[in-house]
Image (cartoon, rainbow, N blue to C red):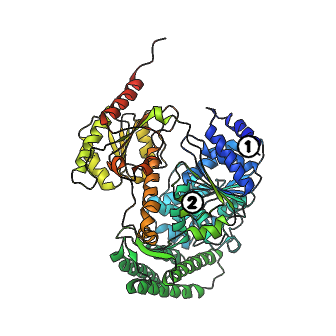
Amino acid sequence: MKNKTASALASVTAALPAAEDRPGQRHMAEAVAAAIQSGRHLVVQAGTGTGKTMGYLVPAVLADKRIVVATATKALQDQLASKDLPFLAEHLDHPFEWAILKGRSNYICLQRVREVQAAGNGQLEMDELAPTVRVEVKRLSEWAGTTATGDMAELDWLPTDRAWQSVSVSSDECPGAARCPMGQPCFAEAARQRAANADVIVVNTHLYGLHVASGGVLLPEHDVVIIDEAHSLEDIMSDTVGVSIGSGRFTSLMLTLKRILDDPVLLGSVVDAGVALRESLVPHVGQRLPLPLPTAVTAALVNGRTRIDNAQSALRAIDTDVEDAKQRKLRAQTQAGRLIDHIDIAIGTHDGSVAFVSGAPDTPRLEIAPLDVGPTLRTGVWDKHTAVLTSATIPASLADRVGLPDGAVDTTDVGSPFEYERNAMLYCAIHLPEPRSPEFAAATHDELVALISAAGGRTLALFTSWKAMDAAAEAVRARIPFAVMTQRDLPKTALVKAFSNDENSCLFATAGFFQGVDIPGRTLSLVTIDRLPFPRPNDPLLAARRDLLGAKAFAQIDLPRAATLLAQATGRLIRTATDRGVVAVMDPRLGKAAYRWDIIKALPPMKRTRHRSEAEAFLREITQAGDTPDPAP
């Protein structure tokens, strides 16, 4: 199997436009093949440039087992669908079928399209939409007649949320294909059927979490699960296995009810129940709640349940032979029933869970999340499938945090092909004040001005808060001759494009840009990070987990998370073999704290310095090398 894997991988990668030998990729592919063959779990860290996607896809396909690949982002899922899997299918001499499966709300719903196009209720729905939204809905309805998949990702334009919601349904609403007249041509059902017949099924990790939480009914039976971007697994599982209830769910239910019930008093009572829940949660935003829940919160949930029961009674009283009306009724009943189920869970007992209130003061949500996702993953995944967990950065505590069984898991680090020691420098501004000092912000701004000037712009400045980003942008913009864009200026994709197209510009951003941003080439020569990205000490879920771990909490939770996020941020710098640059960390704790080596060891093996002059000299060398014209022939 080892020779077969290496040979197939070499054949596939030889077809790449810039083919090169990658020992780390070969090592990874062989490790994945061995794991699938032996049935042992594998955790593999594959640094930037390894080519980890082909490193796991090739041995997975050759194993002739059904594989599910779970990605933390839809962007990577779409990359696999549009680029990696078609390429592999063309160049791997081993036929296989693959499919992409997303949640129902990602597909246009033909039944909803039919309803909004119909006279009567459909026209009333359209009349209630803003004129611009009506235009979008009409455009989407026309697209439904031409698209092959109905997947929103196929669109070459971005509809507003309101327009897309008018022609799609969530999994909480859909009554299922068997009860829908459009169940046979349904795009979501077609995607499920393709997945049922595929050898490789690509989902996002959120959907896989819902599959686990449902007892394994959402996805086809499979032998192996490959979890890409595995550093996000614990957080995503916490979100999907738990329960989240906010006023928005009541508003959404009211809109669904409104399509079939003409009862303003009843509809208003559902919205009022959501408002009452919101008011009961506002005093607790950002806080952990005791169990059982506070009286006011419990009362608001019970009240909401009563109002939904009343709506269910009204729905049951509807007797109609009109098919579209039957479907509106069914969707309303389904959505109401699922909200009641979640309310019952929230009111019930919560052994091994923590309750807290997330969101902003105007949109608080009650969350019930497991303290430990390990038991759920053990029974739902590790005991049923062979698992491969991979990422460019694997937290040291990952295996423990997700409950991988002792003695049944292998770990490996295949490194990165990039020459970090020659092409990258890590600079720690050890002379700056401590981050809590009042002088820290001004000193950081001075440091940014000096480094950006040496880099000739070409900077991605990352911050752990919006406040720090805004203050730095205002202070630095007036002192440098380069354009400074911030995360507030444009949507993420457009912002990255604008930055990439202006080589001398700077981009100031927050945690959302620490990962998933790919800017190769001379546009980016300097990445700065203002503070070590430790999680908030008052995060209610993490606080509960810290209490559970006691003295081990910092080493098990805070330190691995900070190291992983800093490594992800650092990974924005070197994206190709020819990239060069500096990562500058303004937080002096990276050079002073007793735990500093735990963080440094998680970073690529860059040259290190505490002297800004050395970082500036390296940046000027990069800038001047790029500005030097080619010699005359």
As rendered, which of 550 and 365 lies closer to the eye?
550
Residue 587, relative to residue 500: is it above or below? below
Seen in the image, is 572 located left or right of residue 85? left
Residue 422, relative to residue 346: is it above or below? above
Please state the horizontal and vertical placement of residue 582, each as a whole percent of the image: 39, 37
- What's the amino acid at mark 2? Ala
Please state the horizontal and vertical placement of residue 278, each as a whole percent of the image: 38, 77
- Asked where in the image residue 65 lies, by quadrant, the reply is bottom right
Tell me if I can see residue 525 in this picture: yes
Residue sitting at x 50%, y 53%: 158
Seen in the image, is 193 located left or right of residue 158? right
Instruction: Report how far apart the C-alphas of labels 1 and 2 lie in the structure.
Output: 26 Å
Please state the horizontal and vertical placement of residue 383, each as a whole percent of the image: 68, 67
Q: Could you classify mark 1 by the number of other residues whose Cα lies within 10 Å: few (under 14), some (14-19), or many (20 or more)?
A: many
Badge 1 element:
helix
As rendered, which of 124 and 98 lies closer to the eye?
98
Mark 1 lies on residue: 5
Tell me whether the residue at label 1 lies in contact with that at label 2, contact meaning CB atoms closer than 8 angstroms. no
- Asked where in the image residue 613 lies, by quadrant, the reply is top left
Seen in the image, is 150 located left or right of residue 274? right
Residue 163, relative to residue 94: is it above or below? below
Q: Could you classify mark 2 by the number of other residues whose Cα lies within 10 Å: few (under 14), some (14-19), or many (20 or more)?
A: some
Badge 2 element:
helix
Please state the horizontal and vertical placement of residue 461, each as a whole percent of the image: 36, 44
Mark 2 lies on residue: 399
- Asked where in the image residue 18 lies, by quadrant, the reply is top right
Of badges 1 and 2, nearer the viewer stands 2
As rendered, which of 72 and 291 lies closer to the eye?
291
- What's the amino acid at mark 1? Thr
Seen in the image, is 122 located left or right of residue 13? left
